Image (cartoon, rainbow, N blue to C red):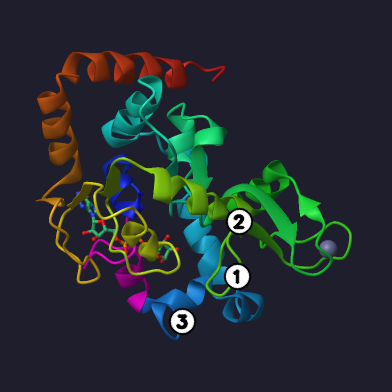
Amino acid sequence: MAGAGISTASGIPDFRSPESGFYSSLQRCDVPYPEAVFELSFFLDNPRPFFTWAKSMYPGNFRPNVIHYFLRLLHDRGLLQRLYTQNIDGLERASGIPGSKLVEAHGSFASATCTGCGKASTEQDFWAAVMADRVPRCAACSGLVKPDVVFFGEALPQRFFLHLVDFPTAELLLVLGTSLKVEPFASLSEAVRSSVPRVFMNREAVDSWRPRSRDVVQLGDLVDSVERLVELLGWTEELRDLVQRETEKLSRPDS
Ligand code: APR
Ligand code: ZN
């Protein structure tokens, strides 16, 4: 299970960290409260704050970091049953984890839909408007186009319900970089059998984490924690090679 804390090392602010989190940057904006940016009623009335945020998230500006590549290494070693992420930055996919192993529970920017007539809008059209500081409008009905990220109160993607199979059969649960504040995602942390070890890695403890006897809680910087775990696993060199190979691949102009 992953949250915004796995992407801060890629330069993407999380939501709730004091000072650096996206929500604290909104104090100066005309929003009634931070989460309003991701509420449909506010968005339809005033989409500007959302598209300002979307512009800061332009996928081309960010690269996966060592945490994403650790999760990719778990996949390469046949150990990743599924990665449930709340992040919409697409960095898990960019690290080479196949879509079949991913549940992007809060959607992603990979597609966009008109809020008026439901017509799909291409990623290109969407980003062309956002990067030009224009509000994306539907070609068919000039309705407001919204990327397929899940707003508060919206249904999660169908794939989220794979958890009904994945969590009861999991043999280990890793929970990385999340405040576990948003449902129904947060409750997944309780959905593994009581005999299954859970590893929580985050800068700080979170009140919704109800300790179990076989838990491991590793607080502190996530890159340090992941690199320590990788060292204990004896995968340091393998991970370094993977990061190097993939970083070179992504920096090639045709990538
Ligand atoms: N190392 C360790 N922990 C970190 C790091 C880091 N480098 N950077 C951030 N964190 C921790 C923060 O301390 C925080 O506890 O990651 C957690 C991120 O929590 P949030 O900002 O609340 O992000 P997340 O849990 O993913 O939010 C869930 O809320 O706003 C909605 O839909 C949005 O998907 C998002 C959901
Ligand atoms: Zn339309």
Marks 1,3: beta carbons within 8 A: no
Q: How many neighbours does mark 2 have within 10 angstroms: few (below 14), some (14-19), or many (20 or more)?
A: some
* Residue at disc 3, CB closer than 8 Å to ligand 1: no
N-term mark: 2 or 3: 3
Residue 152: x and y, percent? 52, 72
Please name the amino acid that badge 3 sits on: Asp
Residue 225: x and y, percent? 14, 40
The residue tagged 2 is 157
- Give me the residue at 15% from left, 33% from top: 229
Span highlighted in magenta in the image: 13-27
- Give me the residue at 85% from left, 56% from top: 139
Residue 244 located left or right of residue 232:
right
Q: Which mark is residue 30?
A: 3
Residue 123 in view:
yes
Please name the amino acid that badge 2 sits on: Pro
Quadrant position of residue 150: bottom right
Residue 134: x and y, percent? 65, 59
State the CA–CA distance, disc 2 to disc 3: 30 Å
- Give me the residue at 44% from left, 38% from top: 91
The residue tagged 1 is 154
How many discs appear? Answer: 3
- Residue situated in front as seen by the camera: 233 or 10: 233
Q: Secondary structure at mark 1?
A: loop
- Residue situated in front as seen by the camera: 15 or 1: 1
Q: Quadrant of the C terminus?
A: top right
